Image (cartoon, coloured by chain):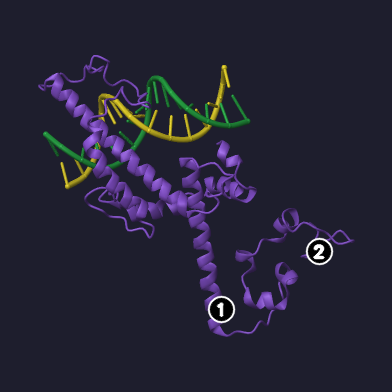
Chain colours: A purple, B yellow, C green
Amino acid sequence: MAELKSLGGESYLALTQSYNQTAFAYSAVRSAGEAGGRVVYPGGAGGGLDFHHAAPLGKAAESSGEQSGDDDELLPFEGAKAGGGGGFERDGKLKAAGGGGAKKPKEQRSLRLSINARERRRMHDLNDALDGLRSVIPYAHSPSVRKLSKIATLLLAKNYILMQAQALEEMRRLVAYLNQGQTLSTPIPATLAPFGQAAAAVYPFPGAALPTCPEKCTAAFAGTTSSGLCKHCNEKP
DNA sequence: TAGGCCATCTGGTCCT
DNA sequence: AGGACCAGATGGCCTA
């Protein structure tokens, strides 16, 4: 994961933290993409997903159609990257004898090539979709940052979704609060003290939206008064 | 040179 | 039967 280390500190932290929070994003993806126990990916005839940024997917489907003619021509051991395990020997015979079906070797070979081409196309579509994902998640476009790996792309995207969901929830709560037209009758919580009465009035949910003081004291807001107390919360760091 | 990442091939399984 | 999906295997490329 070299590219993970080349990410900014924030994004890397966010990425690594995301290892522990998979349930939400996973269930969301499943509910969005699966139909009858089988994922219908947009390159196929059935369509299915209707993401906002559908361009790369559309392109994938298009390229699939274009490739379909040539792919069958690409022999397994002719491509530069055709490392592959097993497959056909150079004489064109199947390595694994595999059920000695009634099909002639020539038909078997043709079928195998067709299956290979289909699988290749499927993986290309998958990669196009991943490229589309890379293009819409933050921190992935800096020239100084190497292209995100597949796993990094997925983890960052998941974390980004969680972050957006949390922000949305905060906005909802804020709107609900403002709609109530309440005045603040309680004292300003310690966590909001550094931001003043106005901030406390606007942000009545300190636990959810603002970092707790221990976090502030040990991270970006580090700093103490002459008495050794955190200058933001007036508590010992 | 080791390790990470990737593309490709392959056989198996499940679904339509 | 054919197609989609998946996981394992293999080899190439790149970087520390």
In this view, which residue lies farthest toward the right? A226
Residue farthest toward the left in the current orientation of the protein: A102
Residue A153 position (above or below residue C6) = below
Q: Position of residue A113 (x, y in %)?
A: 22, 28
Q: How far across and how far down the image is residue C14, in percent?
A: 52, 30
Badge 1, how many Cα within 10 Å: few under 14, some, many 20+?
some
Q: Quadrant of the N terminus of chain A?
A: top right
Measuring 31% from the left and 23% from the top, which residue is drawn there? Answer: A78
- The residue identified by callout 2 is A231
Q: From where the camera sits, is residue A162 visible?
A: yes
To which residue does mark 1 refer? Answer: A177
Chain of the residue where label 1 is placed in the rendered structure: A
Q: In the displayed structure, would residue A154 be above or below residue A181?
A: above
- For image coordinates 21% across by 20% down, the residue present is A98
Q: Name the image quarter holding residue A206.
A: bottom right
Q: Residue at x 48, y 51 (%)?
A: A157
> Please, which residue is most extreme toward the top here?
A91
Q: Amino acid at mark 1?
A: Tyr
Give the residue displayed 61% in from the left and 70% down from the top: A205
Q: Which tag, 1 or 2, sits closer to the chain's start? A: 1
- What kind of residue is marked 2? Lys
Residue A196: quarter of image: bottom right
Residues A24 and A87: in front is A87
Mark pair 1, 2: CA separation: 29 Å
Query: Are the residues at dot 1 and dot 2 in contact (C-beta closer than 8 Å)?
Result: no
Q: Please, is residue A23 above or below residue C4 in the view?
A: below
